[in-house]
Amino acid sequence: MSSLFSSAKDFAKGVRLAADTAVWAGNTVSRHIKGGRNGICLVCNNLQPYDHEETFGRPGAAWNQMADPQQAARRKELSSVPTLQLEEISTKKILESRETDPKTGRPKNDCKYCRLLCEIFDAYFIDEWMNWITETKNGMPIKFGLMIKEGAPLIVNCWNFTYDKWFQNPRVDLELYMDPMPPTPILGAPTMGPTGIRATDVRSQECIRFMKESIEECCTRHPMCAVQPVGFIPTRLIYVGGGKDALRLCDDLPQGESIPYSALSHCWGGGKPLSLTKSTLESLKQHINFTELPATFQDAVTVTQELGLAYVWIDSLCIVQDDKTDWEKEAARMGAVYSRAFIVISGASSPNPSTPYLRPREEEWLPKRFNFSVSPGVNIPITVRQRHLLAAPLDQGLLEPPFTSSWATLKKAGPLYARGWCFQESFLASRILNFAPGAIIFECKTHRKSEDQLPPYPSTIPGTLGEVTPMEQWHMIVKSYTSRQLTFTSDKLPAIAGAATIMPQMRTSKYLAGLWSETLLLDLLWQVMPGRAHLPLMTKEHEENSPTWSWASMNWGVVWSPLSSPELLASVIDAQTTVVGVNPYGQVSGGTVTLRGRIKYCQLSANYHKNEHWVYYKKSDGSYSKKQHFRTDGALVAGTVPGQAGTFACRSRLTTSGNSMETQAIFLCIARCHWLKSDHVGLILGMSPKFPGRMERVGAISNVPKDWYETGEETTVTIV
């Protein structure tokens, strides 16, 4: 009987999806037919959220509802406020508003709203390095999106208008509003809502008041934030409670008591700020000269004193820089230092210690004005400014918890957010003041607000968009962390060790060079982010600091592809790492993973000019299987194995781009996902040139046909 009810429900759901799709298709056709007659642009929808087939609450296409049913449900819930989000609009389309049709002598797309967007892009994205018009005409993948919601600033997402060598598809967000906002909507104007005022100088009284009020609100009105940690005090703190002329280093603090302190997160930026060394320890305990501190440290002292705190922690002054033992011990405690701080001060806008973050705002972060004609002879001023934080999808509403896709991928603007060490410093903070280039942003475990933002503020309470497993949480942490840069490859694991120490896995699992023993097989399936497949991503220094099966061996970002109910087809026989120093979550000098599973010997084909990498095998009848694309771990080379004919794939340790080649490799099947016929996933392995008889990882692969597994041979392999 239950199966009958289930079948009936599935049938009813299918009927409903079919009906919604029919309505969606009808709305799409209707918009295209009526749009031209009604003066509604088919590209930008006149920068308003109404009467579009994608407007929240209207019936959606079945494939969108099935791909993300939770998103579809949230869009329905949020439909009381007219909302529209359009993605991946080609800039070629809006340029047609400036191009003349030779047949009619009129613009190809006579849309004043598209022309407004062109004017805005001209002001923001034409300079001596880049020109969005030229890039568009050259066929570069420049695109934009629109986030339109009644009562909120209109947001324009701009992809690839700028260049970032460390981040593929860089994005800039602009927001449109009127200042002042009219009491009632203006007919013909884009749909825009009010926003807050952005100070022109971070040293202003308005900014100081924002900092104090944000922290007071957090301490008095946020139950989740009110509980203060006890029983931890850093080994050393800088005393600032006696004024700028009475600074000193303290290392005799009473343990077990609660001393509120701030902690600075900053960019070293290649500079060498005033530091604690064996020789300066005693003198710094007596007195620290405020004028000898670099600008970022002076600002940290100023903010700490403004907030009424007596102590601040600064890494270069609280860790003995020429004492390796002290550095390792304090690096292991860094997670506690930042997570137990009363407030973390993030000098996000400073690229180095000598650049203050308490300073006037740079011009690029100040608003620009544009005149827009709503009707003949009637112009209105529209204000545009760059957002300091990339906007989360509108279907999230005011929910922006950690461990969502947007949390892992949306980068804040500022030099600090590109630095690897600074990831965990902000991730671990219970409260943080981000001095970003565009605004001061306060974030706690309850909400996030900025100086130029109006309430209500987005919630940062975990789990509000659904529970995320510890494995998925860790994968998102690594994804976000590895998109940042490190000066020293030996810091790859130490710089995320603090985050590892607070993960749930710490209590039940063994930490293995950035992976966890209880989910090791799925953790091994990391993939290198696109964009660097032709370059060596594992230098000699990386090889000395991580085994090839760890993502820490890569000088590039990594991701995990989502797997639907994976069934494991391999087993772990043994897994070991050699830890360097006293921190079990820190640097390693190598490691091995021994797995039992099915392997398939295959041919590996690489064409770096076309950025293509394939594997295939020779069948028993002499024919070849279909080529399967895989994600390579950077440039590969063909190496020889003593006692064996031919060559085997291995990672390039050189500094030059890879060459096209044909060589041998091994497919190791890890799991299958029961999706059609191409449902197996695993690793592509080569032979280690350093450890004879052992293998090294050269790539990861998904969507592999089942015959690769069925014709494979069961064996045990050791990967180094």
Image (tube, grey):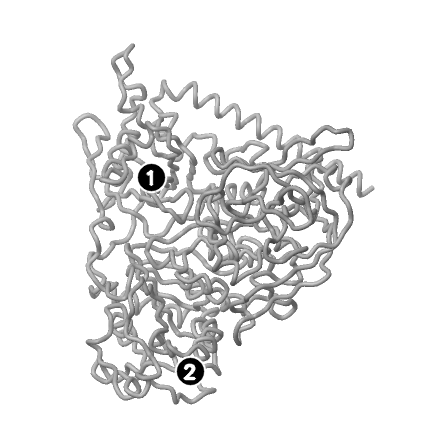
Q: Residue furthest top?
A: 103
Quadrant of res 447: bottom left
Side (left or right) of 585 relative to 80: right
Q: Of marks 1 and 2, which one's residue comes earlier in the chain?
A: 1
Q: How many marks?
A: 2
In which quadrant is the N terminus drawn?
A: top right
Secondary structure at numbered mark 1: loop
Which residue in the structure is indicated by mark 2?
A: 235
The amino acid type of the residue labelled 1 equals Phe
* Kind of element beneath mark 2: loop
Hey, which quadrant is residue 431 in on the image?
bottom left
Give the distance between the C-alpha atoms of the residues marked 1 and 2, in whole angstroms.
46 Å
Location of residue 537 in the rendering, given as x and y in whole percent from the top left corner: 48, 50
Q: Give how far across and how far down residue 321 sits, in percent.
A: 37, 76
Residue 341 left/right relative to 664: left
Residue at image coords 74%, 29% = 622
> Dot 1 corresponds to which residue?
161
